Image: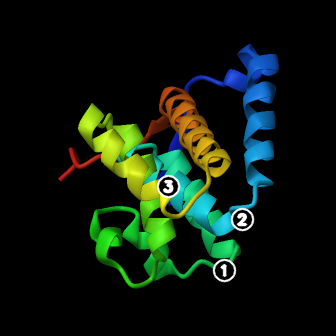
Amino acid sequence: MTALTTRFDIRATNPVLATTLYSVTLMLDKTRFGKRLKHLMDLKISHLNGCLFCIEKHSGEGTEDGIPAETLTLMAGDDWQASPLLTDAEKEAIGWADGLTRGMDEAETDTRLARLRLHYPEQDIGTLIMITAMMNAWNRVGRAGYSHAQPDHSAA
């Protein structure tokens, strides 16, 4: 586990905003997608954004909810795209979150959206967009709020 130091506590400085953000997250936890897909999307987004706090949180929660470590580890790179451990629908949802987080161009957005529509109705796509938006927001809160301590290699 990485040593994290709190440098800014959004809950203390802006409790109403933090609670509102958390409330939306709780709503998204109750969608038809279940915990597996949401954990995988949250973990992929957190890896892309480099939020160690969120990576550790979602890896731990995913493990607690029965997602195999091998599947969770896929989210750290791009191997998930060809993995037999994920369904085609999961791959498209994770790819959508990946593209939105990285900032797809118009052509890629259209291509990914067309592929996503093969697996999900419009309302579900809206939910996937909100899951992605909320995790990106939480990653910004996590990156601002926690310092990721680095080992001191100066003493030799």
* Kind of residue at disc 3: Arg
Tell me if label 2 and label 3 are in contact, CB under 8 Å: no
Residue 90 placed where, x, y %? 50, 67
Closer to the eye: label 2 or 3: 3
Closer to the eye: label 1 or 2: 2
Residue 93 placed where, x, y %? 49, 57
* Kind of residue at disc 1: Gly
Q: Is residue 151 visible?
A: no
At 34% from the left edge and 42% from the top edge, which residue is drawn? 110
Q: Earlier in the sequence, mark 2 or mark 3?
A: 2
Residue 101 placed where, x, y %? 40, 39
Q: Nearer the viewer, residue 44 or 100?
A: 100
Pointer 2: residues within 10 angstroms few (<14), some, or many (20+)? few
Q: Nearer the viewer, residue 5 or 45?
A: 45
Q: Is residue 145 above or below residue 31?
A: above
Where is mark 3, residue-wise? 117
Where is mark 2, residue-wise? 34
Q: SS of the residue at dot 3?
A: helix
Tell me if label 1 and label 2 are in contact, CB under 8 Å: no
Q: Earlier in the sequence, mark 1 or mark 2?
A: 2
At 76% from the left edge and 54% from the top edge, which residue is drawn? 31
Where is mark 1, residue-wise? 66
